[in-house]
Amino acid sequence: MVLEYSKVRDKQYFDEFLNVSLFAKRIKKNPGEKIRGIISVLHTYVYISLILSALFIALFFLGNGPVRVIGSVGAVAALVGLVFSLALVMSFSLRIKEFSNVIEPQTLTIDEKGVRYEYASGSVEIKKKELACIVINKHSVCFLPKKDDAPIIGTGIEYRNKILAGKDKLGYASIITDNTVVSDRKDNKVKQVKKEKKNAA
């Protein structure tokens, strides 16, 4: 199976793929884990830092003695965390924008030997025996190697059906986790509940 493309990639794909790359070790242990985009994860850290900052600042101004010291130390730590989180959001946002604007010939080959991704300046390959799992998420299909320091290969969700169509023939069925099936079931269940409520009304 050979997938060829040369187009502007979806920002949501890179957002999700970067999160998979950062937390690959955890995902390999639980491929069925719901994956969010890295920006969404970092926004959570920003909100937590904001809440902690407000809490410790309040302790500093309202507390006395040791409580005020705890408030001042905690506020400094929380504010440092807030600045760091905001810096990461900006950094990853710029990387995602940069990646999504790259238009170059790319080829993804999936066969009995393994998975090979070729682009203008090089290539990445994961042998079949070295593949830990293939995880299909909302915006991406990711091929994760067993070695933690090995590169991950990914492609857009638009190739999901083609990859699934050849999974048995190529011998990848046992290591594929399709998380979109769970999402589809949840969406259908929500639609069914809404339809039943509408009919009941």
Image (tube, helix red, strand yellow):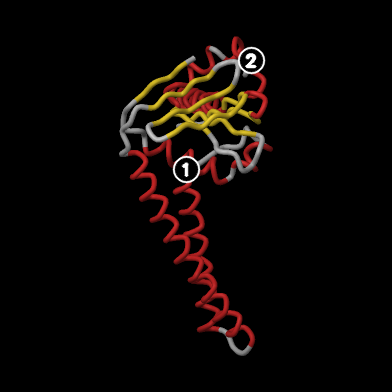
Residue 52 vs 159, above or below: the answer is below
Q: Is disc 1 placed on a helix, strand or loop?
A: loop
Residue 91 vs 177, above or below: the answer is below
Q: Position of residue 101 (x, y in %)?
A: 31, 39
Q: Which of the two residues, 173 or 76, is positioned nearer the viewer here?
A: 173
Position of the C terminus, as image quadrant, is top left
At label 2, which amino acid type do we have?
Answer: Gly
Q: Which residue is mark 1?
A: 37
In the image: residue 106, left or right of residue 180:
left
Q: Position of residue 107 (x, y in %)?
A: 42, 24
Residue found at x 58% / y 85%: 68
Q: Which of the two residues, 186 or 121, is positioned nearer the viewer here?
A: 121
* Residue that lies at the very extreme toward the front in this rendered image: 122
* Residue that lies at the very extreme toward the bottom in this rendered image: 65
Q: Is disc 2 placed on a helix, strand or loop?
A: loop
CA gap, disc 2 and disc 1: 29 Å
Q: Which mark is residue 171?
A: 2
Q: Position of residue 135 (x, y in %)?
A: 57, 29
Residue found at x 38% / y 50%: 93
| Camera-nearest label, 2 or 1 | 2
Q: Position of residue 12 (x, y in %)?
A: 40, 38
